[in-house]
Image: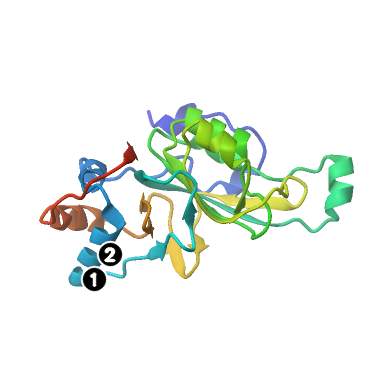
Amino acid sequence: MNVADNKRLTGRIAAENIKLMAVPRPPQGAVARFVALGDPTGIISDTMDELGIPSGVIGASVLRPTIPGTTIVGPALTLRNILQRIDPLQGARDHVNRMAEFEAHNLAQQGDVLVIQGVANLSNMGGISAQTGKRQGEVGAIVQGGVRDIAHSRAVGYPVWASDITPVTGKWRLETVEINGPIQIGEIRVAPGDLVVADDTGVCLKCSGARRSTTASRCRTFPARPTGRSRRA
């Protein structure tokens, strides 16, 4: 029986907008090999250049880590948010909350990385969400858009790489329209299950499919670099 067969939906998003109940798992040993590199994104970027594969790398000046010294590796659990088409103050009065990252957390498997195509200058996830993701076994999150409650996510040891930090809640302003479908992070198309690697230097979003094993094996020819904390799938 698949892990997803035991998952009960929370109803925060229509079932037809959940494209996969569980994301594909990386090849055996791939995560451990990437983690062993210590400071992997630069090595992966160089190696994929040599293999003629677009690396799908975004620098840490764009997606900034909230817990410096942390490395995460795991398959992408994807989510897409858009702006709600209502007045947010009216939405707050009426308690119209259409965000559904908690449904994504509900579907998470051990080692997943939550990857959100979100909205700038609004919080796409906060401290309670980070705590829930941590409890569900996620190793961290990549967010194109805003996040908040950084002290909370740091305290529970849930690293986030985000393009914005803002106190403004997305609760009355955002709507989750799809989980585990294809998303766009900058110029990079990310599919559920794509292997994500993130460290102090940046985020690599496209070590996917059969290429994950090839790239991980090729990267073993490089010496490991000194490392800080790491979290693996």
Which residue in the protein does label 1 denote? 49
Of 136 and 221, the residue lying toward us: 221
- Image side of residue 66 versus residue 23, left or right: right
Examine the image and state in which quarter residue 12 appears: top right
Residue appearing at x 87%, y 50% in the figure:
89
User: Residue 67 appears at what percent x and percent y?
Assistant: 45, 43
Residue appearing at x 41%, y 40% in the figure:
112
The reply to whether dot 2 and dot 1 touch (C-beta < 8 Å) is yes
- Image side of residue 56 versus residue 95, left or right: left
Mark 1 neighbour class, 10 Å CA radius: few under 14, some 14 to 19, many 20 or more: few
User: Residue 216 appears at what percent x and percent y?
Assistant: 20, 53
Residue appearing at x 51%, y 54% in the figure:
181
Mark 1 belongs to which amino acid?
Asp
User: Residue 21 appears at what percent x and percent y?
Assistant: 48, 40
Question: Secondary structure beneath disc 1?
Answer: helix
Question: Secondary structure beneath disc 2?
Answer: helix
Which residue in the protein does label 2 denote? 45
Does residue 106 show up? no
Residue appearing at x 88%, y 41% in the figure:
94
Does residue 95 show up? yes
- Image side of residue 221 versus residue 126, left or right: left
Of 86 and 232, the residue lying toward us: 232
Q: Quadrant of the N terminus?
A: top left
Q: Taking 209 as reference, is 45 above or below it?
A: below
The Cα atoms of the two marked residues, 2 and 1, are separated by 6 Å
User: Residue 2 appears at what percent x and percent y?
Assistant: 39, 32
